[in-house]
Image (cartoon, rainbow, N blue to C red):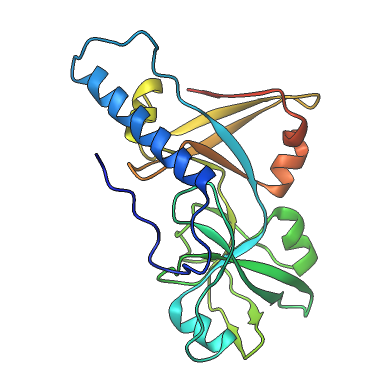
Amino acid sequence: ARRLEEPNMATNIPMPREQLERVVRQIVRQRHAEGLLAGDNPPAMAYAPNLAVNISARHMHISQADLQTLFGPGAELTVFRWLYQPGEFASEQRVTVVGPRGRAIENVRILGPIRPETQLEVSFTDTIALGMDVPVRPSGKIDGTPGCKIIGPAGEIDMPRGVIRAERHVHMSPADAAVWGFSNGQYVKLRVISDCATTYEKVLCRVNEKFLLEVHLDTDEGNACDLVGATGVELLA
């Protein structure tokens, strides 16, 4: 059996049973789909991906060096709440974001684990509040993006770049991708069934064997389609 590894950062709170069960179910589905692709006899119950759609509110990813500057020497991220994807968490650490006109948004939470480079993800509404022109980019693609000032309890940094409106995307395993015939980097559609039924174009597929099947929308997108009140969601080619 594949060994489950808890993250090697911020272990002050153990991964909850609910998330561990999600990981186990994903591994079972992955092995099941791999068997079908290899020509094994199908079992009585067909493989069915379990699609989750969640709102990703404004947040920050941080490098080790910037964490030390903002929170002091020896600072580490500590878990506030584990997120849907294995090993990812909302930390207890929060910062204040200041735009070029001095407009600020306080209590922006940092997500862990540590990243190679600091990045701030905001919604279109947030960019208006900050007085910034921010492009839509996939996470990690920050060349040519604006920066801003970040203030922590022990210091501050002037980010030279890294402020983005995160491109909506879906995390999925190779097994999930195979069900729909999707591939990494492909753009698909998301249909949300609600009183404000909406179909979103250009949902980026991010395929990795470590991923659980989950779509991320930002706050504006989630509110626009009344995601909280939705009765169904589906991915479309």
Which x, y percent locates residue 143? 46, 65
Which x, y percent locates residue 227? 72, 35
> In which quadrant of the rendered image does the N terminus lie?
top left
Of residue 169 and residue 29, the one placed in the foreground of this image is 29
Looking at the rendered structure, the number of numbered marks drawn on it comes to: 0
- Location of residue 47 by image quarter: top left
Of residue 14 and residue 156, the one placed in the foreground of this image is 14
Would you say 87 lies left or right of 210 here?
right
- Location of residue 228 by image quarter: top right
Which x, y percent locates residue 37? 23, 20
Would you say 123 lies left or right of 141 here?
right
Residue pictured at 76% horizontal, 73% vertical: 106
Residue pictured at 58% horizontal, 29% vertical: 190
Of residue 63 and residue 188, the one placed in the foreground of this image is 63
Residue pictured at 65% horizontal, 80% vertical: 149
Please determine whether, in this image, residue 169 is positioned above or below residue 107: above
Please determine whether, in this image, residue 71 is positioned above or below residue 202: below
Would you say 151 lies left or right of 187 here?
right
